[in-house]
Image: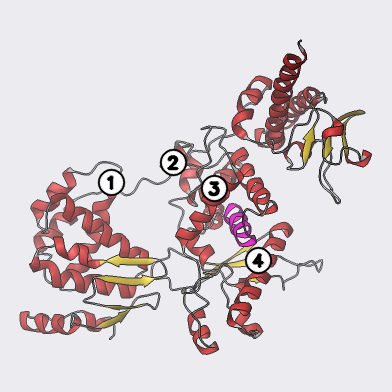
């Protein structure tokens, strides 16, 4: 049935007849994402992970509104995104729960009186829903309701409030927190606590700031290294599907995102892992064209039920084999828990809803002096309204970090991940002189890692998992040198962001100094007869 056929003809009898056809028992429609839903079912699955409970709303609704409500919602489900439809239903359900089962001018006035500055946009969302309902000609929304809504000036959702407040739990991450998350993800993978899919997903979210839905929609073929620059060097890039554009279908358009060599290698490993898993489950090798269409981050539970290559190819055209945005947020939280990644601002485990990475990317771009158009492009915004918040309120996360402040923050930052040892002989590889780490001419620690390392010791070592500082090592001298270098860079450049490049290492060294002092006191007590 076409979109036009969902709108009833004029005249009472014509409307009733058309609604009877539209809402006929068992009538099936397809959502914008290609999912089939039955119009008289109590639940509609509109896309992967998005199921709306229509029956719950109908139970609270006045009978005179029922047919118009269902017909309108079905129209929206077929022409707009599943999230858009879900939001309409949630706002409508909230109004019914708050002020009653009908939609009249009185109920709207009463409902508005219950809203505040942060929730008034609920009514703005409903206004759009009711306009659509009325324009389609379905019964339930009278002209008086439309006239009242048109007379109101409603404030929209607060944009960038968490960014402006630098909220420590919902706003942009500090540089230290971002580094802590990335290092924590790498550390958790190295320990076998997370899979390569978790690591690649986390690093891609962190570096790109894209929405979870965009990352969830990625396919293996979106990783492209075929282009080269004028020097003949590979251009490493990903084609990321767009989302949140009005009427955007599954993977309808793309934006190019350049990646680093390190991230490229991780994503390539994930690509190979995905292909190997799927072919093992299916029991046969796929043609290259089919491999390219596999999800980069697949729903592993969806493949065992695929019975044939024909069914597989059909599913590859939809989001059914992809993970959901909710699962992505779950992975981010799992990484924080596994790596015990703390925030130095709250002293608690870092909260990482995916939007915080978007806020962080925009904040860092504004701090670097990039304009609103560039920031909007980076964040894949359709316009500059949301990007304005970063320009109007350029936050400065990089506060002065002197000796005293460093020691205070060190226990919370959790930057030191190694193991303190009383002396070199007790360290793993302590009998190997090549593992010795020096500061100047003085020995400071032991590296417990077997194999090559390209780090410029000893500064990067303090945040390394394999670092084993000695209790009597010259760690205070390392700390003083780093603080002095920080101050020197700021005096020369006037740029706090540049001066803060080693702040996480400074916090790690401060923690080593603190633990060494504590351990020396314990050893002194033990030596007293």
Q: Quadrant of residue 5?
A: bottom left
Which residue is labeled 1 in the image?
119
Residue at (65%, 25%) from the top-left corner? 406
Instruction: Quadrant for the C terminus, please.
Output: top right
Residue at (59%, 40%) from the top-left corner? 177
Q: Decide whether the magenta segment is chiefly helix, strand or loop.
A: helix
- Ranked by sequence position, the earlier of labels 3 and 4 is 4
Instruction: Quadrant for the N terminus, please.
Output: bottom left
* Element on which disc 3 rests: helix
Q: Position of residue 297 (x, y in %)?
A: 56, 67
Which residue is labeled 3 in the image?
362
- Ranked by sequence position, the earlier of labels 3 and 2 is 2
Q: How much space separates mark 1 and mark 4, taking CA atoms?
A: 41 Å
Question: Would you place residue 288 above or below residue 150 in this image?
Answer: below
Q: Is residue 406 visible?
A: yes
- Ranked by sequence position, the earlier of labels 1 and 2 is 1
Q: Nearer the viewer, residue 368 or 314?
A: 314
Give the crowd class for mark 3: few <14, some 14-19, many >=20 residues within 10 Å. Answer: many
Mark 1 near mark 3, Cβ–Cβ under 8 Å?
no
Q: How much space separates mark 3 and mark 4, taking CA atoms?
A: 27 Å
Q: How much space separates mark 1 and mark 2, taking CA atoms?
A: 15 Å
* Element on which disc 4 rests: helix
Q: Nearer the viewer, residue 135 or 480?
A: 480
Give the crowd class for mark 4: few <14, some 14-19, many >=20 residues within 10 Å. Answer: many
Residue range highlighted in magenta: 194-208
Give the crowd class for mark 1: few <14, some 14-19, many >=20 residues within 10 Å. Answer: some
Which residue is labeled 2 in the image?
162
Mark 2 near mark 4, Cβ–Cβ under 8 Å?
no
Q: Is residue 371 visible?
A: no
Q: Position of residue 257 (x, y in %)?
A: 62, 62
């Amino acid at each position: 049935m076409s979109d036009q056929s969902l709108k009833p003809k004029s005249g009472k009898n014509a409307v009733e007849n058309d609604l009877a056809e539209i809402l006929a028992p068992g009538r099936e429609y397809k959502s914008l994402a290609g999912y089939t839903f039955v119009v008289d079912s109590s639940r509609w699955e509109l896309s992967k992970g998005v199921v709306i409970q229509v029956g719950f709303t109908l139970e609270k609704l006045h009978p005179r509104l029922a047919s118009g409500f269902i017909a309108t919602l079905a129209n929206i489900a077929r022409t707009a995104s599943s999230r858009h439809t879900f939001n309409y239903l949630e706002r409508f359900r909230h109004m019914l729960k708050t002020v009653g089962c009908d939609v009249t001018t009185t109920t709207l006035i009463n409902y508005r009186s219950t809203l505040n500055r942060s929730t008034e946009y609920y009514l703005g969302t409903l206004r759009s829903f009711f306009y659509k309902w009325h324009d389609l000609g379905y019964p339930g929304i009278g002209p008086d309701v439309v006239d009242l809504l048109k007379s109101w000036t409603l404030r929209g959702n607060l944009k960038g409030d968490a960014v402006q407040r630098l909220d420590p739990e919902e706003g942009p991450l500090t540089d230290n927190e971002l580094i802590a998350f990335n290092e924590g993800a790498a550390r958790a993978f190295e320990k076998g606590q997370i899979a390569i899919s978790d690591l690649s997903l986390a690093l891609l979210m962190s570096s790109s700031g894209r929405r979870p839905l965009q990352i969830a929609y990625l396919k293996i073929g979106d990783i492209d290294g075929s282009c080269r620059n004028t020097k003949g060097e590979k251009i490493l890039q990903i084609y990321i599907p767009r989302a949140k554009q009005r009427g955007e279908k599954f993977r309808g358009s793309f934006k190019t995102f350049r990646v680093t060599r390190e991230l490229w290698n991780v994503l390539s490993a994930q690509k190979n892992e995905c292909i190997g898993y799927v072919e093992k489950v299916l029991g046969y090798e796929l043609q290259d064209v089919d491999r390219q269409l596999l999800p980069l981050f697949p729903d592993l539970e969806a493949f065992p039920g695929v019975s044939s290559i024909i069914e597989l190819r059909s599913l590859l055209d939809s989001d059914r084999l992809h993970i959901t945005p909710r699962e992505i947020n779950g992975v981010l939280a799992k990484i924080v828990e596994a790596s015990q990644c703390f925030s130095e601002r709250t002293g608690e485990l870092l909260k990482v809803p995916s939007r915080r990475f978007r806020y962080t990317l925009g904040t860092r771009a504004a701090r670097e002096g990039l304009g609103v158009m560039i920031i909007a492009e980076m964040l894949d915004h359709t316009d500059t309204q949301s990007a304005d918040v970063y320009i109007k309120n350029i936050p400065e996360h990089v506060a002065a970090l002197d000796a005293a402040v460093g020691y205070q923050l060190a226990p919370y930052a959790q930057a030191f991940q190694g193991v303190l040892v009383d002396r070199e002989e007790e360290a793993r590889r302590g009998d190997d002189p090549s593992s010795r780490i020096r500061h100047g001419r003085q020995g400071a620690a032991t590296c417990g890692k077997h194999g090559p390392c390209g780090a410029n010791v000893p500064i990067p070592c303090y945040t390394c998992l394999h670092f084993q500082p000695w209790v009597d090592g010259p760690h205070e001298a390392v700390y003083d040198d780093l603080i002095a270098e920080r101050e020197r860079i700021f005096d020369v450049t006037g740029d706090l962001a540049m001066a803060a490049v080693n702040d996480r290492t400074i916090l790690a060294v401060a923690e080593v100094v603190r633990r060494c002092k504590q351990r020396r006191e314990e050893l002194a007590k033990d030596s007293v007869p």
